[in-house]
Amino acid sequence: MADTSDSRILIVDSDPDFLVWAASHLKAPGVAVITAERAEEALASFQKSRADLVLAEVRLPGTSGIELLKRLRQTDPNAMVILFSGIASTSNVIEAMRLGAYDVLGKEKLPYELRTVVESALRANESRRVTRAQAAEIPAETIQETIIGRSGPMQDVFKMIGRVSRSDAPVMVTGESGCGKELVARAIHKFSPRAQKEFVGINITSIPDNLMESEIFGHEKGSFTGAVTQRIGRFEQCDGGTLFLDEIGDMPLAVQSKLLRVLQEGEFCRVGSNQVLKCDVRVLAATNKDLEAEVAKGTFREDLFYRLNVVRIHIPPLRERREDVRLLAEFFLHRQSARRRGPTMRFTEDALALLEAYDWPGNVRELENTIQRACALCNSDVLLPSDIPLGSTGSRHGNSATTVTRMRDALTMLLHTAQTTPDIELLPWVERELSRMAFRHYEEDAAKASKFLGITSNALQDNLGAPAVKKVPATKKAS
Ligand SMILES: Nc1ncnc2c1ncn2[C@@H]1O[C@H](COP(=O)(O)OP(=O)(O)OP(=O)(O)O)[C@@H](O)[C@H]1O
């Protein structure tokens, strides 16, 4: 075994011969192996002195291995448990992984796989332990903050928010999707004298064109089919407050004209009425389009563009302010921990480095979703690189070049590792691992996982049940 300094492994199986074999197989300097024949005995031993890793047969007499896993994780939510079984049914595999097992192994393959999996589990455990010990608490004031960012560009954004919040000038917030435009608009409102009044946000793309005028300016009863009552629009709703028009570049030209009038004169009419109404609303707008180009094309009014663009705040994409990634990631992780009411979750340094190196085509939204997903799928309070599902949370703009480069790098590493493990049959192993990863990633939805992999559901089920394949079977039988 590799250096797994001072580790305690608890092995649970009703077969004494197997226990003797497994204990001698895993024996190494610095590794203490304890054995138990029943789940109750294992639990008592674990409660007395925690083991770094528990290996247990699924089919134990009395309390099953699955139940043991459940109780171990209740005793210590970070307990590292590997289950093995002669016949590991799909539902057992799923249930075990759902309960937070590190892995589930086929018993007949233990002579070939056990050491590798145990070493990897102990390394993961050690790395989590060190991270827990080193982790500095996030200062309370960071948690109170709603907009996170220490990078130079974000500091400039914060200064602009401070400046514009004192005035009533329209502000145009620009930046790629998911980079925080709405958050900035909310902050401008929050720090403005209008803070006690309403902030109303509308996403222009989410309203059908034929209803947009009525949505923003209201309508009179009977003004169009379906207008059965009078309705006030968003401008009236947030009188004295702030109206945020997201994706303004998609506003139809007819509505643009009416908006221009409100901005110039503070006046408008409801649909189906000639009565002029006055309102005091600050308008903030956002776009991820090139509005100058829309003006040139004639799809956006030039006069409206200048009215809205009195002050512009540009938020750079996350890949141009990588120093914010760590802070944002820790903020989202902390928030997830608080929501789960569990122990404070943390990243290992490797996991943070992975997050910092990624390009985040979906910006902060993608980072937030990635962490939410990682928390949902991981089985410990410390997140490792392997717990982080990069590039899988449906960012609006995929970055295929980056993905291909990352995949090539991963394959190169895999080939390198395979060369130093001469008895592995690489392709079946990769297929099994990919199937497991996809299955976990799609939250055990076999249809989605098999579609993603381009294989049939049956093939996926076979892969999930299949143990790792090695070329040279050893002669020793497991049990
Ligand atoms: N600096 C930040 N600090 C904390 N959370 C952030 C930050 N920037 C963005 N977020 C979070 O990321 C998500 C997306 O942000 P937001 O909706 O403001 O982006 P957007 O640019 O308006 O996106 P879109 O163009 O798609 O409407 C939100 O959940 C928001 O809370």
Image (cartoon, helix red, strand yellow):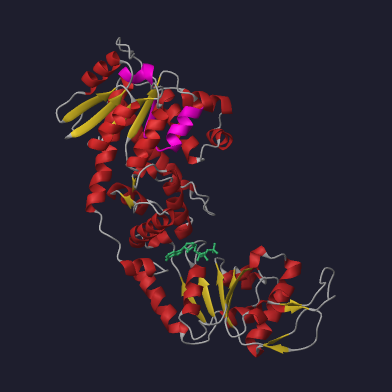
The image quadrant of residue 338 is bottom left
Q: What x and y, as percent, mark residue 330? A: 35, 58
Can you name the residue that lies furthest to the left here? 29
The boundaries of the magenta stretch are 91-111
Expressed as whole percent of the image width and height from the top left, the position of residue 332 reads 40, 58
Q: Quadrant of residue 222?
A: bottom right
247 horizontally vs 19: left or right = right
Q: Is residue 284 left or right of residue 2?
A: right
Which residue is located at x 75 percent, y 89 percent? 276
Q: Residue at x 20, y 34 (%)?
A: 7
Residue at 14 percent of width and 28 percent of height: 29
Q: Residue 87: x and y, percent? A: 45, 19
Residue under the point 30% across and 34% down? 121
Image quadrant for the N terminus? top left
- Whether residue 151 appears in this view of the structure is no
Closer to the camera, 326 or 250? 326
Q: Is residue 104 above or below residue 325?
A: above
- Residue 219's place in the image compared with 287, above or below, is below
* Above or below, comparing residue 21 to residue 327 in the picture: above
* Residue 296 in sight: yes
Q: Quadrant of residue 42?
A: top left
